Amino acid sequence: MSILNKIVVASHNEGKVREIRELLIPYGVTTLSAAELSLDEPVETELTFTGNAELKANAAAIASGLPSLSDDSGLVVESLNGDPGIYSARWANKPKSEGGGRDFSMAMWHVNDLLKSKDRSAHFVCALCLAFPSGKKFTYLGKVHGEIVWPPRGERGFGYDPIFLAEGDIKTFGEMNPIKKHAKSHRARAFEKLIMNHF
């Protein structure tokens, strides 16, 4: 397949857009975010990471007329029956009575509170979908296993990164140098498959 020169990153999440842009820099790809193009955020109605990634990428590709890349990712905690899972971002939603918006400190506290003496094994999942205006799409899955730690450590990364310690590491994703995180994260593992097939 020919090299893609311009891609819409189908996300309004600045942290996620930044990570995807950094991963694509070595391939000379110009990236535009859904927010920059004022694209609507589709309602995530699917019940899997793959389904939601495909929904978002398809919507952005049709609306922009450009190839679009969507990432649906989240934290899966085995002893919480897979929660927060596909609802990872929604766990951080503050009530409208408290001003709305997202508060991942609250979400991390909630995860830790539910765990108490339970097994703390967890993994991050990333479903990455590259969709074209024609309707053609390609989806790749990446995972990284580890455990939940408390208290949160580090101010790098975003989301649940400060409480996730990957297997074999001594630093959480929130403490880790972004370059090192990009080399081993769930998103990086999905990207390896994308790059191998499209660049």
Image (tube, rainbow, N blue to C red):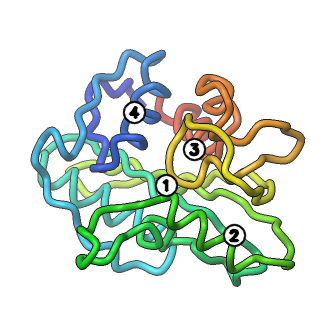
Measure the C-alpha gap from mark 2 to mark 1: 31 Å
Mark seen at residue 187: 3
In contact (CB < 8 Å): disc 2 and disc 3: no
What type is the residue that disc 2 sits on?
Answer: Asn
Picture residue at 48% right of the left edge, 73% below the top: 87
Element assignment for label 4 = helix
Q: Residue furthest front?
A: 98
Label 4 neighbour load within 10 Å: few <14, some 14-19, many 20+: few
Q: Which residue is mark 4?
A: 18
Reading the image, the residue beneath label 2 is 112
Mark 2 vs mark 1: in front = 2
Report x, y in % for residue 161.
Answer: 61, 48
Q: CA distance from mark 2 to mark 4?
A: 27 Å
Q: CA distance from mark 4 to mark 3?
A: 12 Å
Q: Which residue in the structure is indicated by mark 1? A: 139
The residue positioned 43% from the left and 19% from the top of the image is 25
Left of 115 or right of it: where is 100?
left
